[in-house]
Image (spheres, rainbow, N blue to C red):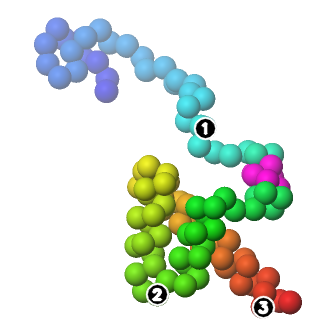
Amino acid sequence: MARTGYAQGVNRGHVTQQRARPERPAAKKMVASKKTKLCREIAREVVGLSPYERRILDMIKTGGSAADKRVYKFAKKRLGSHKRAIVKREDIKEVNAQQRARAAGV
């Protein structure tokens, strides 16, 4: 907000000009680079799924209508947060879809 030059009021203080601040590095924190994405993809291909991820995949394959909730609760218990559990659930669903597509293609 622009300063008025008055000593009292909502916009009190000396009249100043607002400077454009450069973007802080923390703003780019959650954006993965191409190199990082490639490394993670190769690692997933080589190493495969961890035991708890395999269990989640099994729950998705065998579970009925309530599988999503059970998978979420299991992932939340293992990973510790709501956001991470949801991201992991979607990630494993994607793995399941890829496996099904590969099986249908063969």
Mark 2 residue type: Gly
Name of the residue lying farthest toward the front: 51
Q: From what the image shows, is residue 27 above or below residue 56?
A: above
Mark number for residue 64? Answer: 2
For the residues marked 2 and 3, what is the alpha-carbon distance in whole angstroms?
21 Å
Q: In the rendered image, which quarter is residue 76 located in?
A: bottom left
Q: Earlier in the sequence, mark 3 or mark 1?
A: 1
Q: Is residue 39 magenta?
A: yes
| Tag 3 residue | 104
Secondary structure of the residue carrying tag 2 is loop
Residue 26: which quarter of the image? top right
> Between marks 2 and 1, how big is the CA–CA gap?
39 Å
- In the rendering, at what x and y percent does residue 80 appear? 44, 49
Q: Between label 3 and label 1, give the one nearer the viewer.
A: 3
- Verify CB contact (< 8 Å) between mark 3 and mark 1: no
Q: Residue at x 75, y 52 (%)?
A: 40
The label shown at residue 100 is none
Total residue callouts? 3
Q: Residue furthest left?
A: 8
Q: Are marks 2 and 1 in contact (CB under 8 Å)?
A: no
Image quarter of the C terminus: bottom right
The residue stretch that appears in magenta = 37-43
- 27 left or right of 100 in image: left
Mark 3: few, some, or many residues within 10 Å (few <14, many ≥20)? Answer: few
Above or below: residue 52 compared with residue 60: above
| Towards the viewer: 34 or 21 | 34
Mark toward the viewer: 2 or 3: 2
Q: Residue furthest right?
A: 106
Taking depth in this image into account, of 73 and 32 the one nearest to the observer is 73
Residue 28: mark: 1
